[in-house]
Amino acid sequence: MCLHPANSGYSDMADATSGILPSRGLSSPTGQPPLRILPLGGLGEIGKNMMALECGDDIIVVDCGIQFPTEDMPGVDLIIPDVSYLKARAERVRGILITHGHEDHIGALPYVLPDLDVPVYAPRLAHGLIQVKLNERRRTRDAAVYAIEPEEPMAFGDNFRATWFRVCHSIPDAMGICIDTPRGMVIHTGDFKIDHTPVDGHTIDMPALARRGAHGVLMLFSDSTYAELPGYTPSEQVMGGALDRAMADAAGRVIIATFASLISRVQQVVTAAEKHGRKVAFVGRSMVANVQMATELGYLSARPDTIIPVREADDWPPNRVVLMSTGSQGEPTSALVRIAKGESRDVELMAGDTVIISATPIPGNERAVSQTIDNLLRQGAHVLYDRIAPVHVHGHASQEELKLMLNLTRPRYFVPVHGEYRHLRAHAQLAWELGAAPDGIFVLEDGDILEVGDNGARVVDSIPAGPIYLDGLTVMETDTAVLSERRSLARDGVVVVCAGLSSEGEITGPVQVAASGFMEQPDTVDTFRRLAEAVEIETAGIALENNRESAQGKIRKVARQFLRSELNKRPMIIPVILDT
C-alpha cells in the first residue's frame, strides 16, 4: 500500500515509476462517472496551452493557445494544438474556458473555432483581445464569446460548474478556475504569481483559495514555468522604477518592445512617459489594435494628448518620444525586427535611441532575440534587455509561491502544468518534499489520459496531441515530411538531374545537372560534369520497362552516392525524366 509521499519510503521522487507518484487507492464518490483529464498542449513544452476535462456526456476545455516556431521549423508561422479528439466529439464540448489573454492561451482560437463551433468564456480583458483576433478572420467573426466575472458560477452541462477567481500575472484580469465535478473540485491556477502590489490593483484571491482548500480539493493543476527558481517572483512594480530610470537617462527616443497583450506593461510605459513629458506611439498592427481595445474597456488610461499616431512621432524632439512595438521574441515579421534590419516603413533608428526589450526569450527564441539585439547595436542604438538591466519581471510563481498554492488548496491529487518536462518534474519534487497531494502526484505530457474513478486516479491511455503546424493557410500534421524536406533544402540545397527515357525503358543522355543553394556556381562545373557521366555509366544498358518511377529511383540513388562520396553533401535530389 502506498502511503503519504512524505512517508512512502522513496528516497526521492525520481524513484517513482514514469514520473507518477502512486495513489493510495482512496475512493472518490462512487456511482459517479469517471473524470478524465486530457492535456492537449502545454505539458512538456512552453506554450500551446490547452487541457480538456471529460465527465459523462460533457467536455470542457481550459485555454486554447499557440506556440511560436523554433528556427528548425522553416516556413512555419505558428503551432497550434491537435484538437482531433475534440472535433470527433464536438456535440459534447460545452465550452472553452479561458484563464487570461496571452497568446499561448488564446492564440489558437481563430484556427480552432471554425472546426469546433463551441462558445468561449473569458475574463473581460481576454474577451476583448479574443474579439480583436476573431474579427480579423471572416470565418470567426460570428463566434460566440462571453465575458465572465470572478466568483460568478456557470454550469456546463450536467457535470461541470466553473467559477473563475483572480490571480496575478503580467496581464490584467488573469484568473484561475475552480471546476466542480461529480468527483470533487478541480482547481486550475492558469499562469500566476503572488504579487502584493500589482499594476492593476487586483491581488490574488487567497481567501477564496483557502476556503476551497478547507472544503476539499480533489485535484490541483498549477503553473510550473518557473518551478526551478527559488524564492519569490518580484512584483511588477519593479518594472515601473526601471522604466522611469531608463526614460530619465535616455538622451533620445525610447523604443520599448514587448508582447502586444501585456497591457499592464503598456500602462507602466504610458505612466513613465507622462512623468517625463514624452509622447507615446505604438508600432505594429496587433499592438495598435490591443491598445485601442484596452483603452475602450478601461484597462489602459492616458491623458488625452499622451498617445499619438506613429506618423506624428517625427514631429516631436527625440527626447520627447516613446515608441512601443512588438518583436520582443525576435519574430521575423514583427515591428522591432524590421526596425533592427532597417526595413520598417514607420520607424528608422537614429543616433541616441534607447531600445528596451521588455520580455524574456521563450525557449527556442534565444538566437532570434540575440540577432535582433546585435542588429540594433550595429545601427548605434543603446539596448537594454533582461540580462543587463531589470527591464522585465516575469509573471510566473517561483518556488515559495508554488508551495503556498499547494498549502492553501491542499489537493488530494496534484498535476503540474505549463512548462517543459524539467519544470514539471521540479514542481512535482516541490510537492513531494512538502508532503502535498497525499493520493498522488502525476507528471503528465500532452496526450496522456488521467482518469479519476472509484479506485483512485491513474493514467489509462493516450490520444493524439502532437503539434499542428500552420504555414500561411496550409495546415501540416505532426508527421509531415515537408519540414524534413525544408531542413534538407536549407542545409544542402537541391540538385536536379535531367535525363531521357527511351521507348525501350533505357535512360538516355546527355544527362543535364542543375542546382540551387548547393554550391557556388563556378565550383559546380566540373562536379556536375562528372556526376552526369556517373549517371550515364551506371544506367547504361539497363532496361526499366518504361517505368518512370524506376528511372527516377535509379538516378536518385546514383546521384546521392556520388555527391556523398565526392563532397560529403546530402542535397535533395530531384530526377527529371523526359521521353525520347
Image (cartoon, helix red, strand yellow):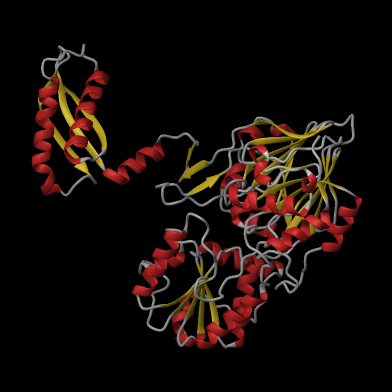
* Residue occupying image coordinates x 79% and y 46%: 7
Left/right of residue 338 with respect to residue 496 in the rendered view: right
Left/right of residue 131 with respect to residue 29 in the rendered view: left
**Looking at the image, can residue 284 be seen?**
yes
Q: Is residue 193 above or below residue 237?
A: above
- State the quadrant of the N terminus: top right
**Looking at the image, can residue 146 be seen?**
no
Find residue 474 and report its horizontal and vertical position in percent. 46, 40
Q: Residue furthest right?
A: 215
Left/right of residue 329 with respect to residue 289 in the rendered view: left
- Viewer-proximal residue among 338 and 391: 391
- Viewer-proximal residue among 58 and 231: 231
* Residue occupying image coordinates x 51% and y 52%: 68
* Residue occupying image coordinates x 11% and y 21%: 508
Find residue 217 and report its horizontal and vertical position in percent. 84, 48
* Residue occupying image coordinates x 41% and y 34%: 481
- Viewer-proximal residue among 530 and 332: 530
Find residue 269 and report its horizontal and vertical position in percent. 59, 77
Find residue 293 and report its horizontal and vertical position in percent. 64, 65
- State the quadrant of the C terminus: top left
Q: Is residue 237 above or below residue 530?
A: below
Q: Is residue 152 above or below residue 248?
A: above
